[in-house]
Image (cartoon, rainbow, N blue to C red):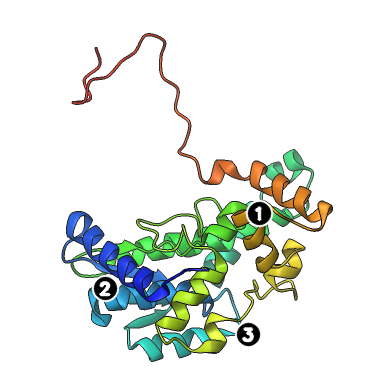
Amino acid sequence: MLRDPVKTKNEIVQWIREYFDKNGKGCKAVIGISGGKDSSVAAALCAEALGRENVVGVLMPNGVQSDISDSVKLVEALGIPYVELNINAAFKGMEQMLAGNEKLMEMCGLDGLSKDARINLPPRLRMATLYAVGQMVPGGARVVNTCNASEDYVGYSTKFGDCAGDFSPLSHLLVHEVRQIGDCLGLPEDLVHKTPSDGLSGQDDEQKLGFTYAVLDHYVLTGECEDQATKEKIDRMHKNNLHKLEPMPAFVPDGSERTDEGAQV
C-alpha cells in the first residue's frame, strides 16, 4: 500500500509536467480510454498536470463494446475532449488480408487468424490509431502508456500495442496502488475498482490469468505465495515475458566503440 497516495499523486503530476517541459512543450497528451482503472487514472493525472483541454481521449471499440458507456462516463467526468474511433473496419481488413492469403495459410497450417494474432491485433491497431491522432492534433501530442507494474510483471499486455507509448505514469505502481491514486483523485468508484476484461472472452482478466491481482501484488512485494502452482505460473509468465520490458537487443560489431558524440572510433 502507498503510505501517502496524495503525495504520490502529486509527484506523478509534477513528473508529467516536467516530462512535457522537456519532451513536448505545448503538446497535448493523447490517451486511449477503455473505461478501466488504468486509463481512467492516467487520464485524470494528465488532466491535472496539463489542463483538461490538453488531454485528448480516444475511445476505440472493435465493433460493439459492451462497456463503452464506462469510457464515456470517464471522459465526461474529467471534462476532456474525446473522439470515438471504431477499429473494426481496420481489424476486418487486416483479417481479410492475412486469412485470405492462401500461401500464408498453407505456410502456417491455418485456415484463419491464429488465437494469438486475433488477440493481439486489436491492441496494435489501437496504438497505431493513437499515434495517428497525435500527429493530427494541432501542435502535436505525446501518447500515454497506461500499463501498471502488476500487468507488466507477468507480461499481460501486447508488445507494440498497449505496451507502447511516449511516457508511462503508472508503470511502477501495482494494481492496488493505482486504485489508491484513483480514489484520491475522486474518480468514480465503479471505474477504479472494477476488474478489467477484454470484452470478448466472457472472462475478466483475473479469470484469464488464473489468479487475482491481490495475490499477484502480494507476491511481487513480498515473494510470498501460498499456492505453489500459482507461484510457479507467475514466475513462468514473468520469465517468458521479460522481452516486452527490455530494450530491443542490438548487435554491436566486435571491436566497435562509440564516443559520447556517437562517432565510431
Quick one: which residue is furthest to the top in this view? Answer: 255
Local secondary structure at mark 3: loop
Residue occupying the point 44% across, 28% down: 250
Q: Which mark is residue 246?
A: none
Please give the residue where the numbered disc 1 appears in the rendered image: 117
Write the residue at 40% across / 57% down.
165
Residue 65 picture location, percent across and down: 60, 81
Q: Residue at x 40, y 65 (%)?
A: 130
Q: Could you tell me how far apart the alpha carbons at marks 2 and 3 are, in whole angstroms?
A: 31 Å
Percent of width and height locating residue 17: 23, 65
> Where does the image place residue 158, in percent across and percent down from the top left?
57, 55
Q: Quadrant of the C terminus?
A: top left
Element class at badge 1:
helix
The residue that label 2 is drawn on is: 49
Foreground: 12 or 110?
A: 12
Residue 203, image quadrant:
bottom right
Question: Circle 3: is it few (<14), some (14-19), or many (20+) Cα within 10 Å?
Answer: few
- Marks 2/1: CA–CA distance: 36 Å
Picture residue at 49% right of the left edge, 51% below the top: 160
- Label 2 sits on what residue type? Ala
Is residue 220 or residue 112 the one in the foreground?
220
Where 173 falls versus 66 (above or below)?
Answer: above
- Closer to us: 77 or 12: 12
Element at label 2: helix
Q: Is residue 239 above or below residue 27?
A: above
Give me the C-alpha separation between circle 1 and circle 3: 22 Å
- Mark 2 near mark 1, Cβ–Cβ under 8 Å? no
